[in-house]
Amino acid sequence: MTRFVLPGDAISLDPIQAASNQPLYIGSGLVHDEKDNLCLVTQMGVLIVDGPKNRMFVETCGGIYEPLAEDYVIGVVRGLKAGEFYRIDIGSDQEALLPVLAFDGATKRNRPMLENGSFIYAKVAQTREDMSPVLSCHMTFQSYAKDWVTNECVFGPLKGGFVTQVSAALCRMLMDLKQEQILSLIGKKIAYEVAIGMNGKIWINSESSENTIRLHLLFQRMKNKSPVECLDLVKNTI
């Protein structure tokens, strides 16, 4: 569920909690009023109620990304910290930290060596107030995990390709299983690879630089469009 909200709006939690037996995570832009079992909005933006992950938050209209646990993100490597963490810029108000061994199959002697300025695809493993978010490149489900050396991992360094900046709302829509037909339709027309970050970044790679640029322009044109409009855009421009 999504809807535009303003500071001071009250969101009843009763219908949301009735739909799930799991604890509800209340994220940025909301303050929980336990007495009346509602949330008060503190920031203007779009209210996101993510049922499968039992969380709700306000996606602000500004350019600062608010990291949430389990979000997939695309970041830029900014260096090492104490030899144990990579410093990663994910567009939030603090740099994220990625442990150097947070890769499937990594050991102290055999692990990825990330270069400054390179791109990385990871998930947010931990967030705490007033602390840097922690990232991980481990797969949650071990049955899907591949050692980093195989180059078949979901997470890890992004080699080649191009990263385009779009809106977090577009990325969220493209990651929605109900809207995966958009990415599938693109794949029927152009052979490509894609990684989508909830921080408003999309990595694209194809067999030619011409097609990569075409895809970059396509995703840029999808901003502020509905899923139906995005489908029509793919059908009519590729």
Image (cartoon, rainbow, N blue to C red):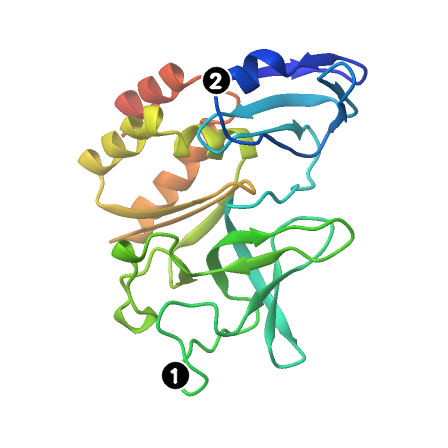
**Residue 172 point in image, percent of width and height:** 48, 32
Q: Are marks 2 and 1 in contact (CB under 8 Å)?
A: no
Residue located at (78% from left, 52% from top): 130
Q: Is residue 205 left or right of residue 201?
A: left
Quadrant housing residue 29:
top right
The 10 Å Cα crowd at callout 1, few under 14, some 14 to 19, many 20 or more, is: few
The correct choice, above or below, for 236 with respect to 77 in the image is above
Q: Is residue 222 left or right of residue 48?
A: left
Residue located at (53% from left, 37% from top): 166
Tell me the kind of residue under disc 1: Asn
* Badge nearest the viewer, 2 or 1: 2
For residue 204, the mark is none
- Residue assigned mark 2: 19
Quadrant housing residue 34:
top right
The correct choice, above or below, for 16 with respect to 133 in the image is above
**Residue 4 point in image, percent of width and height:** 64, 15
The 10 Å Cα crowd at callout 2, few under 14, some 14 to 19, many 20 or more, is: few
Q: Is residue 139 left or right of residue 171?
A: left
**Residue 127 point in image, percent of width and height:** 65, 50
Q: CA distance from mark 2 to mark 1?
A: 45 Å
- Residue assigned mark 1: 110
Residue located at (32% from left, 17% from top): 232
Q: SS class of the residue under badge 2?
A: loop
Tell me the kind of residue under disc 2: Ala
**Residue 180 point in image, percent of width and height:** 31, 30
The correct choice, above or below, for 6 with respect to 219 in the image is above
